[in-house]
Image: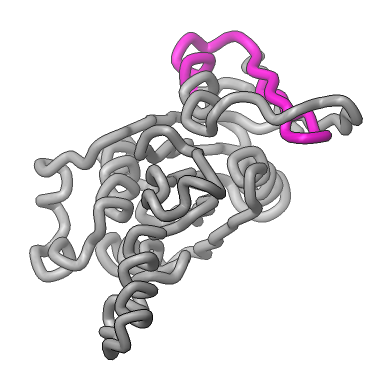
């Protein structure tokens, strides 16, 4: 599949100066996960004001898992859950917060697909650009899972958000490819994959190939 990348950014920490653009009443409700997402989107928005009228695809394997884990502990202790905290724990909550802050009324899509969430997020965003709209903002975000889940999952190794503005006509050409490989094994942490993709976007050339337990994905900047 082919698309054009107009701009992209990868952030690992929140930026307090950028977050000052968000009203204090909303900012207080943002988790660390939401703040990193907002930082990545606001960084691109500073360069591309039209993002306020651009559809968004958010791909996340774990979502706001630290907030969810806290709620689960409260349930175990028999405490009454905060309706606000519960509402903000669902995967599309941060997109709702962004939509209100930016007054963006375009389509918002949230995707979670296990270890292949990162490439499938790309597939969803590229598909939308090819069939529905001129531009789509793709955001992948995850945090290091809480310690209680260390026996089940170890990815990502860092908190980060990767934001990419895809355009139907303008930017550097990117080819996303998928190939079934019976012998392939899972390679690299998702942060390393996203960082590798960001590097070829920065250099405007190169190819990233990663295996996901039977599926080989590649990103090629032409």
Image colouring:
one colour
Q: Residue, x 32% and y 33% (percent of image)?
A: 11
Left or right: 26 in relation to 137? left
Q: Which quadrant is home to the N terminus?
A: top right
Q: Nearer the viewer, residue 190 or 166?
A: 190
Q: Position of residue 205 (x, y in %)?
A: 58, 9
| Residue 157 visible somewhere in the drawing | yes
Q: Position of residue 122 (x, y in %)?
A: 62, 41
Q: Position of residue 127 (x, y in %)?
A: 70, 47
Q: Which quadrant is home to the C terminus?
A: top right
The quarter of the picture where residue 17 lies is top left
Q: Residue, x 85% and y 30% (percent of image)?
A: 179
Q: Residue, x 35% and y 79% (percent of image)?
A: 86
Q: Is residue 207 above or below residue 106?
A: above
**Magenta span covers which residues?**
198-219
Total labels drawn: 0
Q: Position of residue 204 (x, y in %)?
A: 52, 12
């Amino acid at each position: 599949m082919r698309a054009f990348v107009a701009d992209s950014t990868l952030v690992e920490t929140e930026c307090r100066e950028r977050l000052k653009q968000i009203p204090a009443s909303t900012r207080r409700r943002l988790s660390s996960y939401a703040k990193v997402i907002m930082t990545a989107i606001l960084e691109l928005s500073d360069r591309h004001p039209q993002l306020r009228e651009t559809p968004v695809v958010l791909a996340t394997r774990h979502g706001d898992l630290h907030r969810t884990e806290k709620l689960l502990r409260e349930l175990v202790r028999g405490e009454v859950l905060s309706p606000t905290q519960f509402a903000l724990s669902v995967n599309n909550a941060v997109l709702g917060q962004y939509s209100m802050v930016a007054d963006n009324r375009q389509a918002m899509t949230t995707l979670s697909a296990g270890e292949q969430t990162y490439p499938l997020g790309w597939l969803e965003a590229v598909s939308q650009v090819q069939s529905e709209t001129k531009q789509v903002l793709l955001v992948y975000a995850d945090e290091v899972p809480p310690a209680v889940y260390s026996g089940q999952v170890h990815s990502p190794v860092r908190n980060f958000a990767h934001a990419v503005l895809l355009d139907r006509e303008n930017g550097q050409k990117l080819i996303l490819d998928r190939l079934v490989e019976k012998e392939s094994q899972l390679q690299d942490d998702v942060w390393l994959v996203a960082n590798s993709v960001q590097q070829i976007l920065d250099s405007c050339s190169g190819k990233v190939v990663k295996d996901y337990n039977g599926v080989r994905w590649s990103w090629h900047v032409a």
